[in-house]
């Protein structure tokens, strides 16, 4: 690696961009908050945050051409990482209050209300990561991450049809029912929790991502 990695935090109006910027800067990355098309396309890594409603995030992302940027980056094998609703919009659809909104469909599956007695799921929780996870490398099995969400993906539906393709690495957590907490799929990684709010464990996770750029 020659020099710090250039990372763009994509600013489309629906994310904790400042806290993400600070957390990434602590890893030694050269971070910029922008929605500029060329900068987002040419950065070593693109971070897509997200808070609020699925439908509103999708609308904001499309207005900023973020859907096109993500698609083009992934087509060229350029790393993208989604956080919270920035992860949820990568799935095929989101269902809120009975209304279905089309997602980016990078992964099949539906983002649906959490099936738990207490919603939202707010606070610290552990995860179950695959043994060969790069995202969670160097982290103890009892490491805790900070979650704030009322919706999640409960069923992983993606099949790997080609034996030459690496199957995505899926990490799970449980709140009521198990849900997808993180995915590593080639150049596309994502977490349901907020690594930028997850203390030392989150810092290690972001450092792991930066190390792959």
Image (cartoon, helix red, strand yellow):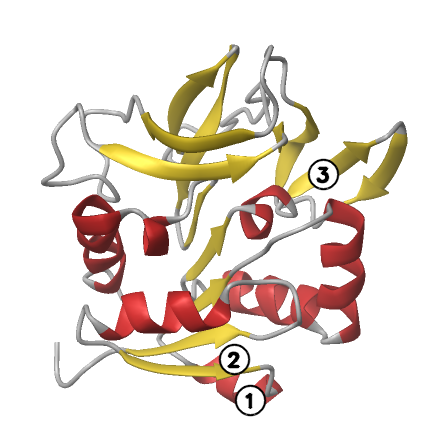
Q: Residue at x 69, y 64 (%)?
A: 67
The quadrant where residue 58 appears:
bottom right
Res 183 visible: yes
Vertical comparison of 196 with 1: above or below: above
Q: Which mark is residue 196?
A: none
x and y, in percent, of residue 53 in the image: 73, 47
x and y, in percent, of residue 39 in the image: 50, 87
Res 76 visible: no
Residue farthest right in this picture:
99
Q: Secondary structure at mark 2?
A: helix
Pointer 3: residues within 10 angstroms few (<14), some, or many (20+)?
A: some
Of the numbered discs 1 and 3, the one sitting upstream in the chain is 1
x and y, in percent, of residue 24 in the image: 29, 69
Position of 147 with respect to 130 (left or right) is: right
Q: Secondary structure at mark 3?
A: strand
Residue contact between numbered discs 1 and 3, judged by CB atoms under 8 Å: no
Residue contact between numbered discs 1 and 2, judged by CB atoms under 8 Å: yes
Q: Residue at x 39, y 66 (%)?
A: 20
Q: CA distance from mark 1 to mark 2?
A: 5 Å
Quadrant holding the N terminus: bottom left
Q: CA distance from mark 2 to mark 3?
A: 23 Å
Pointer 2: residues within 10 angstroms few (<14), some, or many (20+)?
A: some
Vertical comparison of 100 with 8: above or below: above
Q: Which mark is residue 38?
A: 1
The quadrant where residue 155 appears:
top right
Which residue is labeled 3 in the image? 92
């Amino acid at each position: 690696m020659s020099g710090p990695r250039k990372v763009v935090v994509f600013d489309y109006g629906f994310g904790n961009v400042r806290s993400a910027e600070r957390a990434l800067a602590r890893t030694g990355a050269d971070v910029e908050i922008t929605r500029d098309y060329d900068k987002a396309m040419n950065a070593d890594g693109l971070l897509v945050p997200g808070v609020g409603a699925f439908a509103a995030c999708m609308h904001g992302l499309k207005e900023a051409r973020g859907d096109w940027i993500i698609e083009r980056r992934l087509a060229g094998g350029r790393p993208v990482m989604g956080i919270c609703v920035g992860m949820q919009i990568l799935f095929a659809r989101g269902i809120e209050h009975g209304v279905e909104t089309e997602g980016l469909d990078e992964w099949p599956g539906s983002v649906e209300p959490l099936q738990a007695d207490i919603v939202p799921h707010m606070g610290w929780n552990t995860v179950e990561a695959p043994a060969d996870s790069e995202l969670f490398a160097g982290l103890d099995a009892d490491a805790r991450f900070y979650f704030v969400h009322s919706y999640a993906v409960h069923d992983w539906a993606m099949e790997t049809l080609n034996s030459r393709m690496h199957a995505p690495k899926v990490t799970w957590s449980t709140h009521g029912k198990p849900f997808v907490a993180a995915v590593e799929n080639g150049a596309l990684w994502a977490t349901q929790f907020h690594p930028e709010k997850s203390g030392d464990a989150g810092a290690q996770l972001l450092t792991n991502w930066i190390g792959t750029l």
